[in-house]
Each structure stands twice: as structure tokens, then as C-alpha cells.
Amino acid sequence: MSDLILGIETSCDDTAVAVVDAEGSVRSSVVSSQLQTHAAFGGVFPEFAAREHITNILPTVHEALRLAGIQPADLKAIGVTRGPGLIGSLLVGLHTATALGIGWNKPVIGINHLRGHLRSADLEERRVVYPATILMVSGGHSLLAYMKNETDIRLLGSTRDDSVGEVFDKVGRMLGLGYPGGPEVDKLARQGQANIPFPRPLMQNNYEFSFSGLKSAVSRYLAANPDAVLADVAASFVQAVMEVLVKKSRLALKKNPSKSFLIVGGVAANSQLREEAARLCQNLGVQLSLPPVRWSTDNGAMIALAAFDYLKLGIHKPPLPQLQLSINEF
Ligand code: KG4
Ligand code: ZN
């Protein structure tokens, strides 16, 4: 049997566990979602998230092993997210992984969640052609990075304030949509006209993002226009976000020799972003790598795949929490 790693991810509100082999084939992937719990608060309630992880983690581990048809003895190692993330949530995954590692006599490797997201595009089939430029747009992070290969990663720039996903969620709330707002804003925007001139923040030629001004502009517009057509507000907001993301991505692709362009993180599910990225890559003659949506959002498989990178390089980070981690760090 090829080497197998158990990946455990509990950095935010999903309890996710997967079994992956060294080729990136996913033998099982189980995600226990907490959406119902947090929907009432319009965002993740950290203490509740930690408590649900405690309830869900062991059943999720058992289910992942059962679906993969393996025993703990078949595992080579356990990879577990050590950060960035919510402290209570991280601790549940880290302590569980540590206990399982002692009980099963397996090494436990702490993994940078951001490195997991970067590697998600290589799950199932090796899709990524290096060197690659990567746009990571998730609920917690927005950044552009350059990957010479699987493990040589350089940060180009990130957001100065809110992440793209966070802004989608907050604008969704302003529009009276459910949580998380991203998918709902995406749907509503498809029905409207992008006819409101919202600001395009930080359009200079650099790789940094800033979205909090745009969020405030949407809020002010809604307060001043109580009869606004909400679909038009959504469409105009999405258009503003897209123009910024596409401009910065184009700059990154032109300045850094890239064979492919990857988009990872939950916002990679956005229908307009997927269309715009396809157009951009066609114009530049670059291959577009979009992981299936199930690998774009938080999952244990990406953590397991990143753990193989760490093993290959002989990097063994202890399973200790690290609330802030940059993409350059293991
Ligand atoms: O990567 P992810 O699952 O969690 C983090 O690690 O942060 O990303 C979740 C984010 C949420 O903010 C959600 O609203 C957003 O991804 N999202 C979307 C779409 N689907 C999910 N944003 C825009 N359009 C979508 N279709
Ligand atoms: Zn994530």
C-alpha cells in the first residue's frame, strides 16, 4: 500500500479529516460543517466553534478511516493545521492529533493552513504546472503568491484589511442574505446590472488589496438609497471586486514568468471570478488551475497533501498552535 497520511483541519468552523496518499489521491474526505450553528450570528462564533469541534472531531476521524477502508496502523503520519486560525478551534485539532499520534505511535506534523490551500489545486490529479502564480481568496485570507515549485513559495502581496470572503459575507448581511454571504451574493449579482460606481480600492500597480473601503461604500449606498435594487448593488459590488482581483492577477502573471494561474480558497467558487480568470488566462496564454469547489473550501485533504511536502523536505513542525503564520513559513 502506498504511504497514507491522515489530515486534520479545525482552524475555523469546519471539522475536516481526510486520508490522502503521496500522489495526492484522496482516499476519503469528511467535512462536518457548523454552518447551522453560526448562521444565527452572521459569522463564526469562536467559542461555539471550538465546542462543536470537540463533539465532532473523533467521529469525523473514524468516518474518514472507515471510508478509506484502512486501520490506523496503515498510516505513515498525521498532518494537522497549526495555524493561522482561531485558538480554541486549532487546539481541538492539535490536541486530538497529538493524542492519536501517541496512541497509534505515528508522527504528528503541524501544518500551515495557507500552505494547505496552496496545495489544494494538486489534489486528485496533479493539475498544477510550475512555475505558477496563485490567487488565494478565502474567508480569512486574500493574497497573491508565486510558486516556483510545490514548496518554493514567495508572497507577492496580501490584503491590508478585510479578506475578500469576509467582505462578501458582510455585504451579504447588508443585503439581507443568509450566512455565508458569498454564494448568495454571487447568485444575486447574476440577476443585476453593475450600474453603481463603487470604488475600486488600491488600483495602483502593486499586489496589495484593501476591501474595507468598498464594504463601507456599499453600506453608505444602501443607507442613502433605501429603494435600491439589491441585485444591482450585488452586481456592482462583485464587479468592483473582480476588477481589482483581475488587475492584480494580470500584473502578477506578467511580472513573474508563470505557466499556470491557480485560484484557491472559498471565493474560488465565485462564478464570475471563474469566468474572468478563464478570459485572463486565455489572453495571456497561461493554463488555469481551478480546484473543484470541494477542495477550494477548508478540508483535511489539503492538509494531508501539504504534510507530504514537509516529509519530503524533512521539515517536522510540532503540533503547537500558531495564530499568525505567513505563507512563506512552514
Ligand atoms: O476557504 P474558506 O472555506 O474558508 C477559509 O479558510 O477562510 O472560504 C470561505 C469563504 C466565505 O467567506 C464564503 O462566503 C466565500 O468563501 N465563498 C464565496 C463563494 N462561495 C464561498 N464568495 C464568493 N462567491 C462564492 N460563490
Ligand atoms: Zn481556509
Image (tube, rainbow, N blue to C red):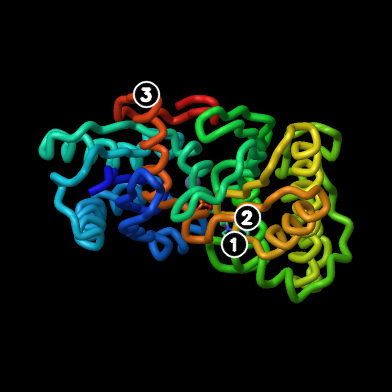
Q: Is mark 1 within 8 Å of ligand 1?
A: yes
The amino acid at mark 2 is Lys
In this rendering, would 170 be left or right of 106?
right
Q: Between 105 and 141, which is closer to the camera in this rendering?
A: 105
Q: Position of residue 311 (x, y in %)?
A: 34, 30
Is 14 left, or right, of 174 in this rendering?
left
- Nearer to us of marks 1 and 3 is 3
Circle 3 residue: 315
Circles 1 and 2, Cβ within 8 Å, touching? The answer is yes
Residue 170: give its label: 2
Residue 181 locus on image (x, y percent): 59, 62
Q: Within 8 Å: ligand 1 and the Cβ of disc 2?
A: no
- Residues under numbered marks 2 and 3 in contact, where contact means CB atoms less than 8 Å apart: no
Q: Residue at x 64, y 35 (%)?
A: 145
Q: Can you tell which quarter of the image residue 323 is in?
A: top left
Quadrant of the rendered image holding ligand 1: bottom right
Q: Percent position (x, y) of residue 64?
A: 26, 57
Q: Residue at x 73, y 58 (%)?
A: 278
- In the rendered view, does 185 fall on the left or right side of 296? right
User: Mark 3 near ligand 2 (CB under 8 Å)?
Assistant: no
Q: SS at mark 3?
A: loop
> Which quadrant holds the C terminus?
top left
Q: Earlier in the sequence, mark 1 or mark 3?
A: 1
**Which one is in front, 296 or 186?**
296
Give the residue at the far bottom of this rendering.
191
Distance between the alpha carbons at the discs numbered 1 and 3: 38 Å
- First in sequence: mark 2 vs mark 3: 2
Q: Which mark is residue 190?
A: none
Mark 1, secondary structure of its residue: helix
